[in-house]
Image (cartoon, grey):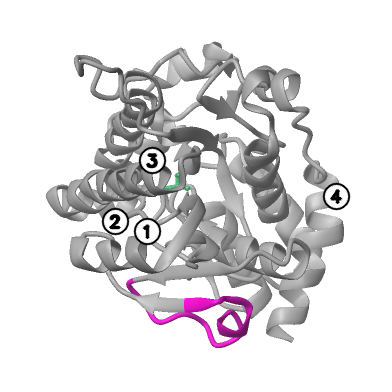
Amino acid sequence: MRKEVVLITGANGEIGHGLISYLSEIDKTHILALDVMPIDEELRPKCERFIQGDILDNMLLGRLVAEYEIRAIYHLASILSTKAEYNPETAHKVNVEGTLNLLRLAVEQAGWQGKPVKFLYPSSIAAYGLPSLLIKNEAGKVKEEEWCNPTTMYGCNKLYCEHLGRYYTKHYRQLAAEGTPSGIDFRAIRFPGLISAITTPTGGTSDYGPEMLHHAAMGIPYKCFVRPDTRLPFMAMPDAIKSLLMLENAPRKALTKLVYNVTSFNPSAQEFFEIVIKAFPEARITFEPDIARQGIVDSWPADVNDEAAKNDWGWKPDYGEEKAFKDYLIPAVRARYA
Ligand code: SER
């Protein structure tokens, strides 16, 4: 008998940390964790097995199919938006070919098991691309089907992988004599900027938020790379984990979409600064906009409409702006760097 597991790629990343803790402690799930980087020691005992390896290594993925019964895949591995611009072709390989490899693995698994395999995919507000700051400021809460003209490689990759998920779920091998459903049950969430108290992001463009907070707590000066008036939607990491778990558990029948927006609050960089400086009055934060990175943030929506997630699977964040900072972020970063 092969052991039933949940596969998490990018396990050592920001979302992976929270997800592994939750699934292992509360859900008692057996976790097969994969990451190109070594996994943090504290996560190791929470996983059935950790494999250091690349999602582009098909031999490795093939061996996983042989050894485990994979009930669900959380495919978190990805090269984020800023990093991707330094080597767009490599980002494409990891973000798109890597996802394709995991989709293929899921098809094989579903075939062996004779039941659907859930494929949870974190997409991003980077899938949007608003053509100008004026339009961004007038667009209001952007819906899933609006403004899908991303300007970054990462955004293009995320949007295309959403399409791949739809193809595998609904149209796979549509010309085959006897329709052969792939067995993939793809579910995606377009995340806003995420803020975690226990990890800092690497290579994103919404990072100015979490970086401001972590630098302030560490007592290190920080140059914010966007203008004070810059506005993006954000969410605290526990809510990101919660939304993934809620979407995984939602009955398929209830889902009217394959891709859902979720959000919680959307401070301007100036408002973010004011909250941080109130908690850490000694913090040395200056605004020194980087024109190119500013351009990326200006193409992302100031807010998103998450009505579909609310209606279809009861989405509601636990952490609004005040609670996120007061009850989670500030005490936890304080404790972390004390
Ligand atoms: N937070 C991510 C980034 O900035 C977007 O998903 O790249």
Asked whether the residues under the numbered discs 2 and 1 touch, taking CB atoms below 8 Å apart as contact, a structural biologist would say yes
Q: Is mark 2 within 8 Å of ligand 1?
A: no
Q: Is residue 39 left or right of residue 23?
A: left
Magenta-drawn stretch contains 331: no
The secondary structure type at the circle numbered 1 is loop
**How far across and down, in percent of the image, does residue 81 sit?**
34, 47
Question: Is residue 330 positioned above or below 319 on the image?
Answer: below
Q: Does the beta carbon of the residue at mark 1 sit less than 8 Å from ligand 1?
A: yes
Which amino acid type corresponds to the residue marked 2 in the rendered image? Lys
1 and 3 marks in contact (CB < 8 Å): no
Q: Quadrant of the C terminus?
A: bottom right
Image location of residue 195, percent across then percent down: 62, 55
Name above or below for residue 272 compared with residue 229.
below
- Tell which circle, 2 or 3, labels the residue nearer the N-terminal end: 2
Bounds of the magenta segment: 36-49
Residue 302 appears in view: no
Q: Which mark is residue 83?
A: 2
Alpha-carbon distance for marks 4 and 2?
A: 31 Å
Magenta stretch: includes residue 41: yes
Q: Are marks 4 and 2 in contact (CB under 8 Å)?
A: no
Q: What label sits on residue 203 in the rendered view?
A: 1
- Using a 10 Å C-alpha cutoff, classify the residue at mark 2 as few (fewer than 14 neighbours), some (14 to 19) or many (20 or more): some
Q: Residues within 10 Å of mark 3 (few under 14, many from 20)?
A: some
User: Mark 1 belongs to which amino acid?
Assistant: Gly
> Which residue in the structure is indicated by mark 3?
294
Image point 41% across, 53% down: which residue?
204
First reached walking from the N terminus: tag 1 or tag 4: 1
> Secondary structure of the magenta portion, mostly?
loop
Mark 4 sits on what residue? 323
Label 4 vs label 3, nearer the camera: 4
**Residue at point 40%, 26% (across, down):** 169
Query: In this orientation, does residue 306 appear?
Result: yes
